[in-house]
Amino acid sequence: MCGIAGIVKTANVPGRCLGAVAAMQLKLRHRGPDDEGLFEDPTRQCALAHTRLAIQDLSTAGQQPMESEDGRFVIVFNGEIYNFPVLRQELVRQGEVFRSQTDTEVLLKLYAREGQSFLPRLQGMFAFAVWDSFTKTLFLARDPLGIKPLYIWRLDQTVAFASEIRAVLQSDIGPRHLNTGALYHYLRMGSVQEPDTLIENISLLPPGHSLIWHNGQATLSRYWNLALTEDADPVEPINPAVAAELTRNALTQSVEKHFVSDVPVGVFLSGGLDSTALVGLASAAGHRNLQTFCISFDDDEFNEGGLAARTARHFQTDHTDVRFRPEEAAGLIEDYLSAIDQPCNDGFNTFCVSRAASQHGLKVVLSGLGGDELFGGYPSFRRIPQLTRLHRRAQQLPGRRLLGRLLERIGHGHRVRRLGEFLSSQGTVEDAWRTVRGFFTDLEARRILEWLLPGSQHDGGLPVQQTVTLMSTDEICQINELELTGYMRNQLLRESDVMSMASGLELRVPLVDQQLIDTVATIHSSVRLRPGKLLLAEAVPEIPEWIRNVDKRGFRFPFESWSRGPWKHLFRDIHSSCPVKCDTWYRLWLLFALQHFISTNRVEISLGKCAGLTYRTAA
């Protein structure tokens, strides 16, 4: 895992890129504390930067930027290619000679031989750039599921890219204007919808895509797409026992390849099914003395420390329980805010447990992220069908839309207001998903925008409908798709990357694996998405009964009580001035994190300041 950055410009743009790229590199040092390197093309049209967290081949042979033997191609790479030994052997049989044991060199030689056609053969998480010094062409690629980020800033005849927005901004190739459309979606859903960011003209390379930039022109290509088998498909559903066997084989292969490393690999272990499945599969594969980590609290509602400790004893892991109290958490607020790349309401839990793992000497950990999305573990898989049924029944009532608008405006509590908005909508699965996952209603978001940007005009639109094209037609598969490509991608994966890398820790997600998803996606949703993640439980019988039978709680912190207690002073200004009632901690945090992002990154907005918010630091 590393940090990458670069600037490329056409020949008619004057000046050098190297100074700006060096500044970008400084913003990525936390991602790669072991080594760093710079490259500048002799024509000065391209400069590349890399910061290294050494995981594979710890020698200096793995230094980046890495050049091909003939000097034509230069690569900077962030991530892991888990099947690189197999790909390497194929290249050796074709006559290639290697100077290192790295996956980076495998990528470099594959691109030199095949261009972008090799991308579907890669298994892993990745974002990388290759500069062709002969044709003056930049090639960028991102993994199929968007585990590794790659931000791109294109303006006129110059393009800058990096692993984090803070680094891209150091290129200073254009003004830092606030993207109000992305801000609207942030207020609605708690995160910015990919490929947008909060800065105009900066976007993420979409997952499963590559981009070729040549002479100021960009060509985007897709090489992978998600395809889910629906209940409506004519294919006969496979037997649950057969489905469990298929899933077991795919899980075993995924977990095993995620242990490919030249340094020890640990596991984040909660009291849940997903992380326990990882430990159970690792134990079954013969991995002994695993280091596992859990965060626990005094508040029993959120404390999974006891379950995690019992599971650790069962599998005989080397377990660390990090106990958190409100005053300790408050002391980490400043460090957490500094680690945030784009604001969101999540990530503090990952930040804290990653910090603990790093302090215990680990460089690589596995996380159970993705299990709820893939196997239907979220309440949304039950609530959304309930909402769409309610909407169909309510259509028969006279004045449905009027009632909905009334509830949205004067309803008591945010849930009632969101329900009112849903009743006045078209009642699609996407509408219901926004109701379940949403933070502020459309009306509330527009009031906040007017408060933040007085006098500005905001033209509606629903970013989810504009940017998400659902491939599924079956309702439950649409929910599955929205959770995988919406919530997981826009929030969980993004924050897991930046929060773990803030501590120089590589976080791997075996349940977010292309080959696993391709296998499980062929199983009918009637089998794949049974309540209680039954398919996962059947596929991993090593999961103890006390984990199978516990109610799902999720990896959460007691933020609600903290926001009313030791963190109360942080939100005083928002409480006193926001035109919308912030009656939950996540609404408060959303606005608090937004202001920190705007002030820290010197983002330009309509009046040159964020009129409604002031930033208050921790005491």
Image (tube, grey):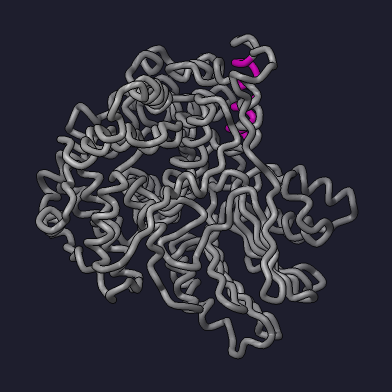
User: From the image, which quarter does the N terminus lie in?
Assistant: bottom right
> Residue at point 62% right, 41% down?
260
User: From the image, which quarter does the C terminus lie in?
Assistant: bottom left
Q: Does the magenta stretch include residue 380?
A: no
* Observer able to see residue 555: no
Answer with left or right where residue 183 lies relative to residue 282. Answer: left
Task: Judge whether 475 appears above or below 526 on screen.
Answer: below
Q: Which of 11 and 98 is in front in this view?
A: 11
Task: Judge whether 373 appears above or below 198 on screen.
Answer: above
Answer with left or right where residue 247 lies relative to residue 20. Answer: right
> Residue at point 45% right, 59% down?
197
Magenta span of residues: 243-256
* Observer able to see residue 283: yes
> Residue at point 50% right, 68% down?
201
* Rendered image quadrant of residue 547: top left
Dominant SS of magenta comes to: helix
Q: Which of 254 and 535 is in front in this view?
A: 535
Residue 503, position as x, y percentages in the image: 40, 55
Q: Is residue 253 magenta?
A: yes
Q: Please identify the residue farthest to the front as the structure is shown.
A: 398
Q: Which of 17 and 465 is in front in this view?
A: 465
Task: Judge whether 424 appears above or below 306 on screen.
Answer: below
Residue 469, position as x, y percentages in the image: 56, 42
Residue 41, position as x, y percentages in the image: 68, 80
> Residue at point 69% right, 85% down?
11
Task: Judge whether 505 appears above or below 534 on screen.
Answer: below
Answer with left or right where residue 549 lies relative to residue 366. Answer: left
